[in-house]
Amino acid sequence: ACVGFVETVRFPLASLRHSTNATRAVATLIIELEANVPIATGAITLSGMYGYKRIGEEVMGKIPIEVSKNGVVDTATLEPEADWDGVSKLVLTLKPDGPGLQPAVTVPMGSATARAADVVVVKLLMRNGDQQAPYEVSVSASEHRMMPWAVDVGPETTRLNVVVV
């Protein structure tokens, strides 16, 4: 980086994929996140997830998640359940004494202390809603009062567009 360079606090990698785009089908959602600043406390919020439904009787509530960090199963970074508001918001809570997410560290050439950024992958099950156009999904982190950052949700044609009767 250049001397004096300042970058926006953001998620350079933020993506949301799902295993099926069939309406009303249970889908595995896969969220990938990488931050460019340390995120150690608070919550990471994905907004704009309209159309997804929580599985079960309750519209809103806790959803079990599976987490891996840097390709390894991780139980230390995030709480084992995400909070779903019943409409469009999914909240991932960082564990208070956990390692959090760390950004990449770059150092002068020849130094052995450089490291890649943490990449967190979160998997959860939700039910797709009815046929609809895709919404813009964004992600933010409460610790940094981060402005919402766009989440890559893939081509527009892949979001809940297959009608199952």
Image: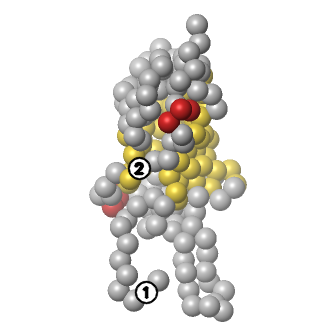
Report the disc number at residue 2.
1
Is there a contact, CB below 8 Å, between mark 2 and mark 1?
A: no
Q: Residue furthest top?
A: 165
Q: Is residue 79 visible?
A: no
Residue under the point 37% across and 65% down? 9
Callout 1 amino acid: Cys
Which residue position is annotated with label 2? 150
Residue under the point 50% across and 47% down? 152
Residue 15 percent across, percent down from the top left:
53, 48
Q: Residues within 10 Å of mark 2 (few under 14, many from 20)?
A: many
Residue 11 horizontal side relative to residue 123, left or right: left
SS class of the residue under badge 1? Answer: loop
Residue under the point 44% across and 23% down? 132
Is residue 132 shown above or below 17? above
Residue under the point 50% across and 36% down? 156
Residue 70 horizontal side relative to residue 100, left or right: right
Residue 87 percent across, percent down from the top left:
36, 27
Q: Residues within 10 Å of mark 1 (few under 14, many from 20)?
A: few
Quarter of the image for the C terminus: give it: top right
